[in-house]
Image (tube, grey):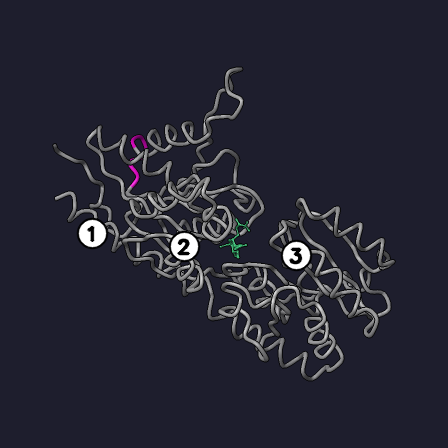
Amino acid sequence: MLFTFSGLLLFIGRMKIGVVCYPTYGGSGVVATELGLGLARKGHEIHFITYRPPVRLGHFHQNVFYHEVDYEDYPLFEYPPYDTALASTIVDVVQYQNLDLLHVHYAIPHAAVAYMAKKILLTQGRYVPVITTLHGTDITLVGANRTFAPVVEFSINKSDGVTAVSQSLKDDTLRLFHIQRDVRVIYNFIDFERFRKVDKDHFKKIIAPEGERIIAHTSNFRKVKRVEDVVRIFQRIRERVPSKLLMIGDGPERPNAERLCRQLGICADVRFLGKQDAIEELLAICDLFLIPSENESFGLAALEAMACEVPVISSNSGGLPEVNVHGQTGFLSEPGNVEEMAHYAIQLLTNEPLLQKFRRNALAQAKRFDLNLILPEYEAYYTEILENSQIKVE
Ligand code: GMT
């Protein structure tokens, strides 16, 4: 059979890349969108294939295209067959936009759906390599569950390239699944054009009129984030240091966290801000960031805080130690050890020179994950996978 393969584009450097991701507020969707936008700025043509425009997509860009997954409901479907609709849309976009490769973020269901699309395209004589980026819970939480595990393992093994956002996630993947292929670690990244400390003093005066310390937590408020620990840590800090807590984001655990604030009588000092677009403006006024997660493959929220010169008190789970350096950019404790986390927070907040030093260290560490350093790693990986795929087809 004769396969058409648009790898020729490789030699002129400009790639046409299909990006499949969750368009919601969530680390994997944010990484996928910002990677796509970064690649578009470098001249690649990026085609997002999702059920809604990704939240961080923003304004029009000449190299960015958006293809909505077309889905028609039918009374028979108690569960919408989104996977089938997505596979059909991928087939359509690859064919008609002549894509070079597909980059899917979050294994479930994207890696399996991409495999199906690849197989359909092969019957039409078209080969498109698939790269899967593992983000965390697709491996450690949902992925490892037997409801999904066989499909996750199969689709990782069938991807042409697989990346993990931290060494810890790679190790977890190899421990939890029978993986017969290489998994490349390409760290998450930060765009310093957007995330940097800016002067928002007027804003600070509104949140903390008496010059209180400002502490923040950002997440999707899922169980794995241990948001009640955030409240308990803050309660302990507040007993020693006048301070305010900003709870940014939303999710299933928010009502429990709000209830706990009421029980503890600390509501006046805690603000639940819901989902926010300009997180960097909030981080700009913060003194400390809390992320006590049960598990965290990377902790993009911590990196965003560090880029804005905010030290981090975190758990030591998953990939967090690869981002937050104990005793330099913040402190790490066992998940659930709220006493120790509060102790570390108070130590920093009551020692201005130490806090300033940690602020500088946080920024220096964040610079290791600069978008401009990580983007070329993805480009090189794409090129490698395209070249290998070409050899396979030939
Ligand atoms: O948090 C999740 O449930 C899934 C996922 C997401 O889409 O937000 O988060 C994961 O991917 C992020 C981006 O790579 C990582 O920074 C997060 O650490 C990771 N979350 C977990 O591992 C819990």
Assess whether mark 3 and mark 1 are in contact (beta carbons under 8 angstroms). no
| In magenta stretch: residue 98 | yes
Q: Pointer 3: what residue? A: 226
Callout 3 secondary element: loop
Horizontal arrangement in the rendering, residue 353 relative to residue 379 (left or right): right
Tag of residue 176: 2
Q: Which residues are magenta?
A: 95-99
Q: Quadrant of residue 325?
A: bottom right
Mark 1 or mark 3, earlier in chain: 3
Q: Position of residue 150 (x, y in %)?
A: 38, 42
The three-letter code of the residue at mark 1 reads: Asn
Residue at 81% over, 68% down: 238
Residue at 79% over, 69% down: 236
Horizontal arrangement in the rendering, residue 390 relative to residue 335 (left or right): left
The three-letter code of the residue at mark 3 reads: Arg
Q: Position of residue 24 (x, y in %)?
A: 56, 42
Residue at 40% over, 40% down: 47
Assess whether mark 3 and mark 2 are in contact (beta carbons under 8 angstroms). no
The three-letter code of the residue at mark 2 reads: Leu
Q: Residues within 10 Å of mark 1 (few under 14, many from 20)?
A: some
* Camera-nearest residue between 188 and 235: 235
Task: State the separation of the CA atoms marked 1 and 3.
Answer: 42 Å
Tag of residue 388: 1
Task: Name the quadrant of the C terminus.
Answer: top left
Tag of residue 102: none
